[in-house]
Each structure stands twice: as C-alpha cells, then as structure tokens.
Image (cartoon, rainbow, N blue to C red):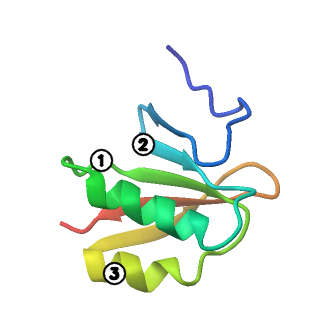
Amino acid sequence: MGSDSGMARAPGEQWREADGIHIEVRGLPPPDPLVLILRLIDSLADPAPVIVHHDRDPQLLYPELAERGWTATPIEGEAGELRLLLERER
C-alpha cells in the first residue's frame, strides 16, 4: 500500500504511513489543532513519529511539546502547508 498523502483529508483525521502517524489539522479553528495534536501524542504507547499537516505555525504548541518531551521539526509539505515532524526525545 503506497503513500496516499496527496489525498484530501478531513480536518482532524489521523492515519498511519511508513513514516509515522499523520494528523490533518488544516482548516480547524484554534484551539482545536493544539487540542487534537496533544491528545494524539498523549495517547501514544509507542514512540512513533507524528506528522502534523497544519496551515500556520502553531506557536502555542511548542512549549506544550517541550513539556511532554517532544520535539518539532519543520519538514517539506504541500504548497501552503506547514508540515511538522514531532518526535519523542530519547
């Protein structure tokens, strides 16, 4: 099964690909993206990377991630998208 990241996703949708767990938060009003992202990482039993598909830089997310022991790295995404790779610190 190949990558289907080019497929349109519903806001709030989560799916798993080879590179980790993806979450689509574009189009959601604040604070929904923050809440959904934190709920997802707090629920993970394994240290799988999380790829966030966002439409803006989530400034309030970064201190929350640091408090939970996660890092955020911008990665290449679609035009008009901010894509972040979230990883649990080792």
Q: Residue furthest top?
A: 1
Q: Looking at the image, which is closer to me, 62 or 28? A: 28
N-terminal of the pair, mark 2 or mark 1, is: 2
- Label 2 and label 1: CA atoms lie apart by 7 Å
Count neighbours of disc 3 (C-alpha within 10 A) and say few if under 14, some if 14 to 19, many if 20 or more.
Answer: few
Relative to residue 65, is residue 34 drawn left or right?
right
List the residue tagged with mark 3.
Answer: 66
Indicate which disc, 2 or 3, sits on the residue closer to the N terminus: 2
Question: Picture quarter containing residue 55?
Answer: bottom right
Tell me the CA gap for discs 3 and 1. 16 Å
| Element marked by disc 3 | helix
> Which residue sits at x=20%, y=47%?
46
* Amino acid type, mark 3: Ala
Question: Along the horizontal axis of the image, is 31 left or right of 22?
Answer: right
| Above/below status of 69 relative to 14 | below
Q: Nearer the viewer, residue 10 or 46?
A: 10
Figure check: 27 above or below 48 = below
User: From the viewer's perspective, is 7 left or right of 16?
Assistant: right
For marks 2 and 3, give the CA distance.
19 Å
Horizontal and vertical percent position of residue 63: 42, 86
User: Which disc number belongs to residue 83?
Assistant: none
Q: Position of residue 87 (x, y in %)?
A: 34, 61
Circle 1 sits on which residue?
48
Disc 2 and disc 1 in contact, CB within 8 angstroms: yes
Q: Quadrant of the C terminus?
A: bottom left
Hey, what amino acid is under mark 1? Ala
Image: 23 above or below 75: above
Residue at 60 percent across and 75 percent down: it is 58
| Label 2: which secondary element | strand
